[in-house]
């Protein structure tokens, strides 16, 4: 889509803040008025729109994508988003451990087990380990505890969490990022532990590098969105 506006600024709306393109408030793809709860978040979205060239590139506006999805999906069908996230918990990445070699087993235990312990302490969700790739069912009580925890998020935070979980392939990593147990860099290291190990042993792969850059960008955007939503300075993220 060609750029159809000259200016992009944050501005006040009747019920919050928005992005004004040539003075007109931005709407979501679902035609909802893009009303944001945070002035800082509105300013960050406006910056994304100002940064567009003659052709608008949606992929270069991750905060806008999260905000629009929050209004068009999570605000209307939160249960749908919650159940998708619980699906990740049912096959939680951090629970599937390698059978060999020993140094990978040790690395997984050192990075992943503290996060599983944190999830159990924080949410009352004890998740069971498995070796290899065969599926292991998780306790219903643990999944219910995670469902309750995720359901408490507002649509904005829920959508940011979903962005992180899809990128990481792990509900626990996503929760730890959104709840500030992990930085985006630490979340990336946890989510990509196996892939990083393979790259160390076998060398770089252009496709893998491109995919990993996308994972890192999504995790960073999800955390930044929540920080802006809550008025936390970027330097404190």
Image (cartoon, rainbow, N blue to C red):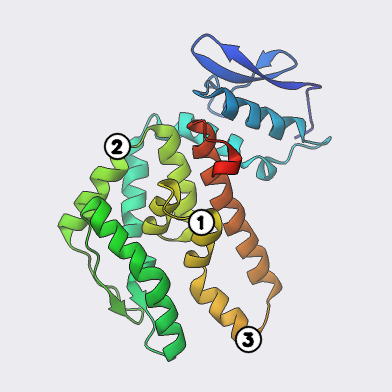
Q: Residues within 10 Å of mark 1 (few under 14, many from 20)?
A: many
| Mark 3 element type | helix
Q: Quadrant of residue 201?
A: bottom right
Nearer to us in this view, 190 or 143: 190
Q: Is residue 136 above or below residue 143?
A: below
Mark 1 / mark 2, whichever is N-terminal: 2
The disc label shown at residue 167, or none: 1
Give the alpha-carbon distance from disc 3 to disc 1, as whole Å: 23 Å
**Farthest residue toward the right?**
54
Question: Gap in Å between the C-alphas at discs 1 and 2?
Answer: 21 Å
Instruction: Find disc 2 in the rendering and name its residue.
Output: 152
Which residue is pictured at 43% across the width and 37% down the height?
157
Q: Residue at x 29, y 39 (%)?
A: 151
Locate the N terminus and report the quarter of the image it occupies. Answer: top right
Mark 3 or mark 1, earlier in chain: 1
Q: Is residue 80 above or below residue 9?
A: below
The reply to whether residue 89 is in sight is yes
Circle 1: element type: helix
Residue 96 pos. (x, y %): 35, 74
- Secondary structure at numbered mark 2: loop
- Label for residue 80? none
């Amino acid at each position: 889509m060609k750029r159809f506006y000259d200016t992009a600024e944050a501005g006040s709306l009747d019920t919050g803040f928005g992005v004004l393109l040539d003075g007109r408030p931005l709407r979501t793809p679902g035609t909802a008025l893009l009303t944001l709860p945070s002035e800082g978040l509105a300013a960050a979205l406006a910056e994304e729109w100002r940064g567009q060239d003659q052709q608008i590139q949606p992929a270069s506006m991750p905060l806008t994508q999260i905000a629009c999805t929050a209004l068009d999906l999570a605000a209307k069908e939160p249960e749908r988003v919650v159940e998708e996230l619980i699906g990740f918990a049912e096959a939680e990445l951090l629970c599937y451990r390698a059978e060999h070699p020993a140094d990978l087993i040790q690395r997984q235990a050192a990075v992943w087990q503290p996060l599983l312990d944190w999830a159990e302490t924080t949410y009352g969700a004890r998740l069971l380990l498995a070796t290899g790739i065969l599926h292991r069912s998780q306790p219903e009580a643990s999944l219910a505890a995670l469902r309750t925890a995720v359901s408490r998020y507002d649509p904005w935070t829920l959508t940011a969490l979903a962005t992180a979980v899809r990128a990481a392939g792990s509900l626990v990593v996503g929760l730890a990022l959104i709840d500030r147990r992990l930085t985006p860099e630490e979340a990336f290291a946890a989510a990509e532990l196996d892939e990083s190990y393979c790259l160390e042993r076998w060398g770089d792969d252009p496709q893998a590098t491109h995919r990993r850059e996308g994972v890192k960008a999504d995790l960073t955007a999800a955390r930044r969105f929540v920080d802006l939503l809550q008025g936390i300075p970027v330097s404190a993220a």
